Amino acid sequence: MSARHFGVDGCRAGWFCVGLEGGKLSGDLYPGLSSLVEATGRAGSVLVDIPVGLKAGSEGPRQCDVLARQHLGKRASSVFSAPIRELLEAGSYAEANALSRALSGKGLSKQTWNICGKIREADRLLQTSDSARQRLREAHPELCFYGLNHGRPMQHAKRSQAGFEERLALLARHLPDVRPFLDNMLIRYPRSQLARDDVLDATVCALTASLPASWRHIPENGERDRTGLTMEIIFPDLSST
Protein backbone atom coordinates (compact mmCIF):
# COMPACT_ATOMS: atom_id res chain seq x y z
CA MET A 1 0.00 0.00 0.00
CA SER A 2 1.25 3.46 -0.90
CA ALA A 3 0.50 5.80 2.01
CA ARG A 4 2.20 7.36 5.02
CA HIS A 5 -0.23 6.53 7.80
CA PHE A 6 -2.14 3.32 8.48
CA GLY A 7 -4.93 2.05 10.69
CA VAL A 8 -5.69 -1.65 11.14
CA ASP A 9 -8.64 -3.62 12.49
CA GLY A 10 -9.16 -7.34 12.68
CA CYS A 11 -11.99 -8.70 10.54
CA ARG A 12 -13.54 -12.05 9.64
CA ALA A 13 -11.14 -12.65 6.75
CA GLY A 14 -8.00 -11.43 8.52
CA TRP A 15 -6.90 -7.82 8.91
CA PHE A 16 -8.33 -4.73 7.22
CA CYS A 17 -5.89 -1.89 6.65
CA VAL A 18 -6.70 1.72 5.75
CA GLY A 19 -3.98 3.96 4.35
CA LEU A 20 -4.13 7.74 4.49
CA GLU A 21 -1.98 10.31 2.74
CA GLY A 22 -2.88 13.86 1.79
CA GLY A 23 -6.52 13.23 2.69
CA LYS A 24 -6.73 10.30 0.27
CA LEU A 25 -7.96 6.98 1.67
CA SER A 26 -7.09 3.50 0.45
CA GLY A 27 -8.01 0.10 1.85
CA ASP A 28 -6.91 -3.51 1.55
CA LEU A 29 -7.63 -6.78 3.30
CA TYR A 30 -4.78 -9.09 4.34
CA PRO A 31 -5.06 -12.69 5.55
CA GLY A 32 -2.14 -12.24 7.95
CA LEU A 33 -0.64 -9.41 9.95
CA SER A 34 2.90 -10.16 8.77
CA SER A 35 1.96 -9.62 5.11
CA LEU A 36 0.21 -6.38 6.10
CA VAL A 37 3.30 -5.06 7.88
CA GLU A 38 5.41 -5.93 4.84
CA ALA A 39 2.94 -4.23 2.48
CA THR A 40 2.95 -0.98 4.45
CA GLY A 41 6.64 -0.56 3.70
CA ARG A 42 8.47 1.92 5.88
CA ALA A 43 5.44 3.86 7.10
CA GLY A 44 6.12 5.88 10.20
CA SER A 45 3.09 4.66 12.12
CA VAL A 46 0.69 1.73 11.95
CA LEU A 47 -2.03 1.91 14.61
CA VAL A 48 -3.76 -1.40 15.22
CA ASP A 49 -6.84 -2.26 17.28
CA ILE A 50 -5.31 -5.20 19.14
CA PRO A 51 -3.57 -5.49 22.52
CA VAL A 52 0.18 -4.88 22.26
CA GLY A 53 1.96 -6.24 25.31
CA LEU A 54 0.39 -8.59 27.85
CA LYS A 55 0.55 -9.01 31.61
CA ALA A 56 1.30 -12.30 33.33
CA GLY A 57 -1.38 -13.81 35.54
CA SER A 58 -0.04 -12.45 38.82
CA GLU A 59 0.54 -8.89 37.60
CA GLY A 60 -2.99 -7.49 37.52
CA PRO A 61 -4.71 -5.69 34.62
CA ARG A 62 -2.99 -3.55 32.01
CA GLN A 63 -3.21 0.07 33.12
CA CYS A 64 -4.02 1.21 29.58
CA ASP A 65 -7.23 -0.87 29.65
CA VAL A 66 -8.22 0.50 33.06
CA LEU A 67 -7.61 4.12 31.98
CA ALA A 68 -9.37 3.66 28.64
CA ARG A 69 -12.53 2.54 30.44
CA GLN A 70 -12.34 5.54 32.75
CA HIS A 71 -12.20 7.91 29.77
CA LEU A 72 -15.03 6.23 27.87
CA GLY A 73 -17.69 6.29 30.57
CA LYS A 74 -20.83 4.67 29.16
CA ARG A 75 -18.78 3.22 26.28
CA ALA A 76 -16.37 1.53 28.73
CA SER A 77 -17.71 -1.93 27.85
CA SER A 78 -16.13 -1.59 24.39
CA VAL A 79 -12.71 -2.10 26.03
CA PHE A 80 -12.19 -5.82 26.55
CA SER A 81 -9.71 -6.91 29.21
CA ALA A 82 -6.59 -8.22 27.48
CA PRO A 83 -5.90 -11.87 28.31
CA ILE A 84 -2.91 -12.79 30.42
CA ARG A 85 0.04 -14.07 28.44
CA GLU A 86 -0.31 -17.63 29.72
CA LEU A 87 -3.63 -18.01 27.88
CA LEU A 88 -2.26 -17.55 24.37
CA GLU A 89 -1.62 -21.25 23.83
CA ALA A 90 -4.90 -22.51 25.34
CA GLY A 91 -6.78 -24.83 23.01
CA SER A 92 -10.34 -24.08 24.10
CA TYR A 93 -12.41 -21.48 25.91
CA ALA A 94 -12.94 -23.85 28.84
CA GLU A 95 -9.20 -24.37 29.22
CA ALA A 96 -8.44 -20.66 28.90
CA ASN A 97 -11.16 -19.67 31.36
CA ALA A 98 -10.00 -22.18 33.96
CA LEU A 99 -6.38 -21.10 33.53
CA SER A 100 -7.33 -17.44 33.87
CA ARG A 101 -9.19 -18.11 37.11
CA ALA A 102 -6.30 -20.14 38.50
CA LEU A 103 -3.58 -17.61 37.65
CA SER A 104 -5.32 -14.24 37.93
CA GLY A 105 -8.40 -14.94 40.03
CA LYS A 106 -10.66 -13.74 37.21
CA GLY A 107 -12.50 -15.54 34.44
CA LEU A 108 -12.09 -14.84 30.73
CA SER A 109 -14.92 -13.23 28.76
CA LYS A 110 -16.13 -14.92 25.59
CA GLN A 111 -15.51 -11.64 23.71
CA THR A 112 -11.83 -11.70 24.67
CA TRP A 113 -11.54 -15.41 23.86
CA ASN A 114 -12.96 -14.74 20.39
CA ILE A 115 -10.04 -12.44 19.57
CA CYS A 116 -7.32 -14.49 21.30
CA GLY A 117 -6.26 -15.97 17.95
CA LYS A 118 -5.53 -12.52 16.57
CA ILE A 119 -3.85 -11.43 19.82
CA ARG A 120 -1.62 -14.51 19.57
CA GLU A 121 -0.83 -13.76 15.91
CA ALA A 122 0.08 -10.15 16.71
CA ASP A 123 2.18 -11.12 19.72
CA ARG A 124 4.15 -13.75 17.81
CA LEU A 125 4.91 -11.20 15.09
CA LEU A 126 5.97 -8.59 17.64
CA GLN A 127 8.29 -11.11 19.32
CA THR A 128 10.02 -12.06 16.07
CA SER A 129 9.97 -8.97 13.83
CA ASP A 130 11.98 -5.84 14.61
CA SER A 131 10.01 -3.95 11.95
CA ALA A 132 6.70 -4.85 13.56
CA ARG A 133 7.97 -4.01 17.04
CA GLN A 134 9.14 -0.59 15.89
CA ARG A 135 6.05 0.37 13.91
CA LEU A 136 2.94 -1.33 15.31
CA ARG A 137 1.29 0.74 18.03
CA GLU A 138 -1.94 0.01 19.86
CA ALA A 139 -5.04 2.16 19.40
CA HIS A 140 -8.67 1.69 20.38
CA PRO A 141 -11.31 2.99 17.93
CA GLU A 142 -13.77 4.15 20.58
CA LEU A 143 -11.00 6.05 22.35
CA CYS A 144 -10.00 7.59 19.01
CA PHE A 145 -13.58 8.73 18.40
CA TYR A 146 -13.65 10.07 21.97
CA GLY A 147 -10.53 12.13 21.25
CA LEU A 148 -11.78 13.42 17.90
CA ASN A 149 -15.00 14.41 19.67
CA HIS A 150 -13.04 16.66 22.06
CA GLY A 151 -13.13 14.26 24.98
CA ARG A 152 -16.76 13.17 24.72
CA PRO A 153 -17.75 9.50 24.26
CA MET A 154 -20.04 8.56 21.40
CA GLN A 155 -23.73 8.70 22.29
CA HIS A 156 -24.88 5.58 20.45
CA ALA A 157 -23.64 1.99 20.22
CA LYS A 158 -21.33 1.38 17.29
CA ARG A 159 -23.40 -1.36 15.66
CA SER A 160 -26.66 0.61 15.71
CA GLN A 161 -27.60 2.72 12.69
CA ALA A 162 -27.50 5.86 14.83
CA GLY A 163 -24.04 4.91 16.11
CA PHE A 164 -22.79 4.20 12.60
CA GLU A 165 -24.00 7.58 11.33
CA GLU A 166 -22.63 9.37 14.40
CA ARG A 167 -19.13 7.99 13.85
CA LEU A 168 -19.23 8.46 10.09
CA ALA A 169 -20.22 12.11 10.51
CA LEU A 170 -17.33 12.67 12.92
CA LEU A 171 -14.87 11.13 10.46
CA ALA A 172 -16.30 13.25 7.63
CA ARG A 173 -15.29 16.43 9.47
CA HIS A 174 -11.68 15.44 8.84
CA LEU A 175 -12.05 13.20 5.77
CA PRO A 176 -14.66 14.56 3.32
CA ASP A 177 -14.42 11.47 1.08
CA VAL A 178 -14.94 8.92 3.84
CA ARG A 179 -18.51 7.97 2.88
CA PRO A 180 -17.76 7.05 -0.76
CA PHE A 181 -14.61 5.28 0.46
CA LEU A 182 -16.63 3.20 2.90
CA ASP A 183 -19.27 2.43 0.27
CA ASN A 184 -16.55 1.30 -2.13
CA MET A 185 -14.96 -1.01 0.46
CA LEU A 186 -18.34 -2.60 1.24
CA ILE A 187 -18.91 -3.23 -2.47
CA ARG A 188 -15.41 -4.63 -2.90
CA TYR A 189 -15.55 -7.04 0.06
CA PRO A 190 -18.58 -9.17 1.08
CA ARG A 191 -19.93 -9.03 4.65
CA SER A 192 -18.60 -12.56 5.17
CA GLN A 193 -15.13 -10.98 5.04
CA LEU A 194 -15.57 -7.39 6.19
CA ALA A 195 -18.18 -5.59 8.32
CA ARG A 196 -18.93 -1.90 8.00
CA ASP A 197 -17.74 -1.19 11.55
CA ASP A 198 -14.38 -2.78 10.62
CA VAL A 199 -14.01 -0.05 7.99
CA LEU A 200 -14.96 2.68 10.48
CA ASP A 201 -12.54 1.35 13.09
CA ALA A 202 -9.57 1.03 10.74
CA THR A 203 -10.30 4.47 9.28
CA VAL A 204 -10.36 6.23 12.65
CA CYS A 205 -7.09 4.51 13.53
CA ALA A 206 -5.55 5.73 10.25
CA LEU A 207 -6.78 9.26 10.91
CA THR A 208 -5.26 9.11 14.39
CA ALA A 209 -1.99 7.86 12.89
CA SER A 210 -1.92 10.96 10.68
CA LEU A 211 -2.19 13.29 13.70
CA PRO A 212 0.97 12.47 15.72
CA ALA A 213 1.22 15.99 17.18
CA SER A 214 -2.11 15.38 18.93
CA TRP A 215 -1.27 11.93 20.29
CA ARG A 216 -1.93 11.16 23.92
CA HIS A 217 -0.56 8.00 25.47
CA ILE A 218 -2.19 6.13 28.34
CA PRO A 219 -0.58 5.45 30.67
CA GLU A 220 2.00 8.20 30.26
CA ASN A 221 4.77 6.25 31.98
CA GLY A 222 5.14 3.61 29.23
CA GLU A 223 4.33 0.45 31.20
CA ARG A 224 6.18 -2.55 29.71
CA ASP A 225 5.46 -6.25 29.75
CA ARG A 226 8.01 -8.98 30.50
CA THR A 227 9.07 -9.15 26.85
CA GLY A 228 9.75 -5.41 26.65
CA LEU A 229 6.62 -4.42 24.72
CA THR A 230 5.12 -1.08 25.69
CA MET A 231 1.56 -1.46 26.96
CA GLU A 232 -0.11 1.80 26.02
CA ILE A 233 -3.05 3.01 23.97
CA ILE A 234 -2.70 6.00 21.65
CA PHE A 235 -5.55 8.37 20.85
CA PRO A 236 -5.85 11.96 19.57
CA ASP A 237 -6.38 14.77 22.07
CA LEU A 238 -8.18 17.61 20.29
CA SER A 239 -9.63 19.13 23.46
CA SER A 240 -7.67 22.37 23.00
CA THR A 241 -8.65 22.90 19.35
Image (cartoon, rainbow, N blue to C red):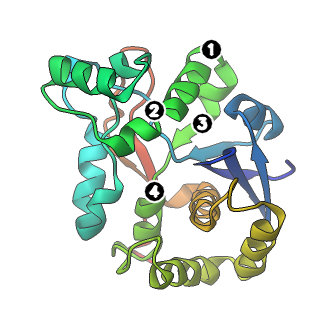
> Residue 190 at what x, y percent from top left?
75, 61
Give, as a three-letter code, the residue at label 2.
Answer: Cys
Q: Compare marks 2 and 3 and give the one earlier in the sequence.
A: 2
**Point 60% across, 59% down: residue:** 198
Using the image, determine if residue 112 lies above or below residue 153.
above
Q: Nearer the viewer, mark 2 or mark 3?
A: 2
**Alpha carbon of mark 2 to alpha carbon of mark 3: how far?**
18 Å
Mark carried by residue 235: 4
Question: What residue would you read off at disc 2?
Answer: 116
At numbered mark 4, what does the secondary structure look like: helix, strand or loop? strand
**Alpha carbon of mark 4 to alpha carbon of mark 1: how far?**
26 Å
At numbered mark 3, what does the secondary structure look like: helix, strand or loop? strand
> Residue 135 at what x, y percent from top left?
63, 34
Left or right: 38 as drawn, with respect to 144: right
**Point 30% across, 26% down: residue:** 94
Question: What residue would you read off at disc 3?
Answer: 136
**Point 42% across, 63% down: residue:** 142
Question: What residue would you read off at disc 1?
Answer: 128
Counting every numbered tag in the picture gives 4
Give, as a three-letter code, the residue at label 1.
Answer: Thr
Q: Quadrant of residue 240?
A: bottom left
Q: Quadrant of residue 223?
A: top left
